[in-house]
Image: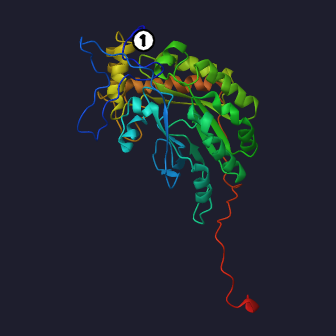
Amino acid sequence: MPDRENRPGLPKGRGTSENPPNRYHATRRDSDVPDASGEEVSRPPLQTRLFPDTARTVLTTNDSPDVGPGQSLNPYRGCEHGCVYCFARPTHAYLDLSPGLDFETRIFYKEQAPELLEKELARPSYRCEPLALGINTDAYQPAEIRLGLTRRILETLLKHKHPVTIVTKSSLVERDIDLLSGLARNGLVHVHLSLSTLDKELAQYLEPRAATPGRRLETIRSLTDAGIPAGVLVAPVIPVLTESEVEKVLEKARLAGAVSAGYVILRLPLEVRDLFEDWLETHVPEKKSAVLSAIREFHGGKLYDARFGVRMRGTGVRADLLEQRFRMKRRRLGFPGLQPLRTDLFSPPASGKKQLPPLFPDFA
């Protein structure tokens, strides 16, 4: 890998050096401005800034056949983990911000999320089904240390015996083992650790502020030791770059106690494509051509196919081979799988609406 830290213009601890315009911008702003000599000016370390999100609802329904019908709650918009490949980066366009550095340095938090969740669970029309917590951006990203929104949400879910699934790259989930254990005793929680590579150096540049691969494996062990069903999500599988590690990741995760395993192929929607190509040029220029060529093999000659049913697995011979490798290794390792989450224990909150007294009390 190139000596990244000594290259001007590359912000330390960030997944990208770019802040390109989002797809709604008519003009482009340059992230680096040359000085009088024509040299790039090195920028000071970028600070993360937090902004309150005044959302009035927090539950989002999903009907994608890729992940199944369900609902999700994302306490944060943007993610400081800085994973260069993150499929959620383009969502910052809705905030009139860039999918690049803005996405990982300007984080919006839904400060009323626990209260809004309680309100939505109390609706007479609400029907209980598993809630995916942090499915778009990580619910355990660094801002959670200070804000504690995810913990308060879990307290609400535990209070009302509501099922939840979590996918994270953070060891911070261990902080909430007390709540997760309570949910697990009633069959109400699944936790998945996302693991793209076992290479610590590669992970440092792919996902700079996420927990190291070894630390995530330790987290799987901590969760399973506490009786919390934990699985591994090999995601994303990056053709050429991490593709050969799939079997090893499964072995290490199973050894750590993971009871389930899944995978997702790299996705490059909208602005993520250019960001990832720039990342390849910066970190692994000698592999760039091979990586992009292999990605196209998975997507019928394109860098991304957004169609449901294929966007997370790909198509063609190479995609079929990866699926066969994955299934064979998972079977050999004996992953027992996860039990369905229970929905029959749900105890809805009181609606808070006071009934009017009867007009004729004597006949009530």
Q: Can residue 161 be seen in this view?
A: yes
For residue 133, which quarter of the picture? top right
Q: Where is residue 219 in the image (x, y as percent from the top left)?
A: 67, 26
User: Which residue does the image show at 49% across and 52% down from the upper left?
Assistant: 55
Q: Can residue 127 be seen in this view?
A: no
Is 27 rendered above or below residue 64? above
Is 270 rendered above or below residue 240? below
For residue 332, which quarter of the picture? top right
Q: Does 98 sit left or right of 248 as displayed?
A: left
Which of these two is toward me, 139 or 238? 139
Q: Coloured how? A: rainbow
Is 51 rendered above or below residue 362? above
Is 65 rendered above or below residue 361? above
Q: Position of residue 77 (x, y in %)?
A: 48, 40
Q: Position of residue 155 (x, y in %)?
A: 69, 47
Q: Residue furthest front?
A: 36
Label 1: which secondary element: helix
- What residue is pinned by disc 1? 4
Which of these two is toward me, 355 or 238? 355
The quarter in which the C terminus is drawn is bottom right
Query: Badge 1: few (under 14), some or many (20 or more) residues near its Cα, within 10 Å?
Result: some
Mark 1: amino acid: Arg
User: Which residue does the image show at 39% across and 17% down from the upper left?
Assistant: 10
Q: Where is residue 289 in the image (x, y as percent from the top left)?
A: 31, 15
User: Which residue does the image show at 68% across and 20% down from the upper left?
Assistant: 255
User: Which residue does the image show at 57% across and 44% down from the upper left?
Assistant: 132
**Figure disc tally:** 1
